[in-house]
Image (cartoon, rainbow, N blue to C red):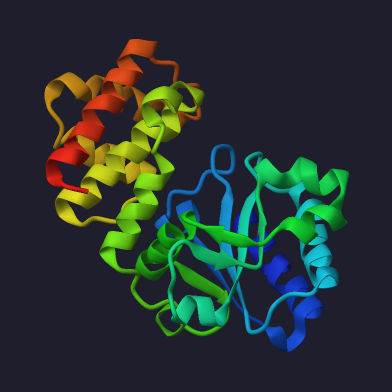
Amino acid sequence: MRERILLEEITHRYQRILGQNFLGLYVHGSIAFGCFSWEKSDIDFLVVVATPLSLSEKEKLISVMLELDLIGPPKGFEMSVVLLKTCRSFHYPTPYELHYSNAHKAKYLADITEHCRLSYGTDPDLAAHFTVTRAVGFPIYGPPVEEIFPPVPKDIYWASLLNDIQNVETEIMTDPLYYVLNLCRMLAYQQEGLILSKEQGGQWALSHLPLSYQPTVAEALVCYQKGLPFTPEHHQATAFAQAMTEKFSAYGS
């Protein structure tokens, strides 16, 4: 599998850059869920280090991402570097040492030193990434997941999920495929405690949502599975978003 080869290459290069400071590389996201698609998925992973990164180390790690992005999937990579103490003594929002994704690629290409200097802080999404890693993730290098990532409190995981959709009713048309399926998997977690991929969330919703919402979910699933654009009517998408957020409120948040 091309994605596995890329992850092993990243691991090999990061070992050379970081030496003993490199403690592990852990896969989460669609690869961990077993539903990765080269055309529609990104490669999600967390890097765990023992001590804070120097600016030189950050630049070298990002240079690897930029180089391999040329032969990676269209959606690229999403990578965060976190300290071991952050994993074992969890805080929310969660501190990180370095982050890379397609959303930041242009800034790194424009001025890698300056953007590496600015790439640190806290990220609410990491609570969700840690939870998925704990549930289905695996190491390419490093100790077993359970030795690095203790359980994230359920209320913190839910807060992380809510943060991702805080403006969903106004933003859903910016990426309706992501938002519709993400809302489905969130509802599956809230109602049944299930940690699912977007595709699994959509499949769950088809048997749990009222019939009036199922055509929207079914259309999103087909588009996701076939790599097709999902272009629902504006009123259809916003009505779905409103209905799901009302369900979240009804079950308590």
Say above or below: 141 vs 155.
Answer: below
In this view, the residue farthest toward the bottom is: 20
Say above or below: 183 vs 83.
Answer: above
- Residue 247, by quadrant, is top left
Q: Position of residue 244 (x, y in %)?
A: 24, 32
Residue nearest the observer in this picture, 223 or 248: 248
Say above or below: 209 vs 14.
Answer: above
Say above or below: 16 vs 242.
Answer: below
Q: Is residue 84 left or right of residue 210?
A: right
> Which residue shows up at 50% across the image and 24% down it?
174
- Residue 47, by quadrant, is bottom right
> Which residue shows up at 54% across the image and 43% down it?
41
> Which residue shows up at 74% across the image and 79% down it?
15
Q: Position of residue 187 (x, y in %)?
A: 23, 43
Q: Position of residue 204 (x, y in %)?
A: 22, 42
Q: Position of residue 185 (x, y in %)?
A: 30, 44
- Total numbered labels: 0
Q: Is residue 186 left or right of residue 72?
A: left
> Which residue shows up at 39% across the image and 12% down it?
234
- Image quarter of the N terminus: bottom right
Residue nearest the observer in this picture, 31 or 181: 181
